Image (tube, grey):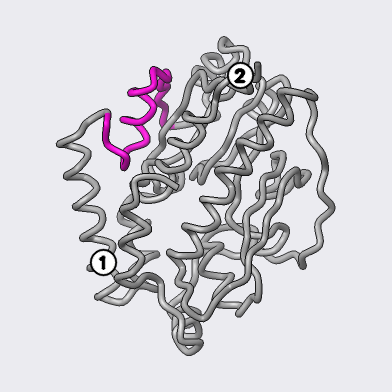
Amino acid sequence: MVKVFIITQNEPFYIPKMVKLLVREQKENYKIVGATILSPSRKNKTIRDWLKERIKIYTVFELFIVGVSFVLSKSINLILKRKSPYSNENILRGNDVELIQTDDINSVEYIAKLKALDLDIIISISCPQLFGSEILGTPKISCINAHGTLLPRHRGVFGSFWTLHDNDKFAGSTIHTMELKLDAGSIIWQKAFPVTANDTQFSIAYKTKRDMAFGLVEVLSTINSTNKYDIVEPVFESSYHRAPTKEQAKNFRKLGRSIVKCKDLLLMLKRSF
């Protein structure tokens, strides 16, 4: 059985659905032996920096929608505790998964704890910190990353935004082995879907995370039975992005696109995929 460790961030809307699915589908194929949940702000950046990036591209009404969703999810967390569907921590603790906390995934102390678990796979799901060489060499098989674009297209951050900004006909998810270079490595799973006129950044994010959750189950099941993974040849044009500027947000709006709409509340507050 493949021993799996998850490194992710504290996000209430989509990642808990992924974690819930991965926990539910363990069975005889793999076992999640531990996890780390990081702050959503990237290393050397504060929550204030994280908010400033989003204020540049969100309208006031969009911030209101996200704020309402956030308050609802947090309230439900407090009421339901370990039974809440909106907390990675509650879902993992409720399924007896050990949580190992750190401020730095590349610290000597943290890596020593991971090595003691004798891991086969480390999964990165929206991890806000870069993996260094030591942690990349920790699992026996590989570190793998679930990324919400059709790599190598839209490497970097805000992938669902750039998919709509660049007027792509297709969006999708990729699972790949990890290297020191960001969003590089061999593609081991990929799935595309058509972008519609009604899609928002949040609806794209929902679809990509839904697909990559099932993709991770598929990949882990394959590794369990063969102890290896298949390589998928890249077919999409390579690009790399940082957080969008105000001017790029204006271009996004000119296409008639939105970050989030009221209908996306249903996706954010769904209990599971």
> Which residue is found at the position 41% from the left and 31% from the top?
103
Residue 64 appears at what percent x and percent y?
Answer: 22, 68
Graded by Cα atoms within 10 Å as few (under 14), some (14 to 19) or many (20 or more), the crowding at tag 2 reads few
Can you identify the residue that label 1 sits on? 65
Q: Is disc 1 placed on a helix, strand or loop?
A: helix
Q: Residue at x 31, y 53 (%)?
A: 269
44 inside magenta stretch: no
The residue type indicated by label 2 comes to Glu
Image: 183 above or below 54: above
Vertical comparison of 41 with 178: above or below: below
Q: Quadrant of residue 163?
A: bottom right
Q: Is residue 108 left or right of residue 273?
A: right
| Residue 60 location, quadrant | bottom left
Query: Vertical placement of 10 versus 2: above or below?
Result: below
Span highlighted in magenta in the image: 83-103
Indicate whether residue 93 is drawn in magenta.
yes
The residue shown at (16%, 45%) is 75
The residue positioned 22% from the left and 38% from the top of the image is 77
Query: Disc 1 and disc 2: Cα gap in Å?
Result: 40 Å
- The residue that label 2 is drawn on is 28
Judge from the rendering whether residue 175 lies leftward or rightward of residue 90; answer left or right. Answer: right
Image coordinates of residue 117 in percent, x first then y, are 56, 12
Q: Name the amino acid type tagged 1.
A: Ile
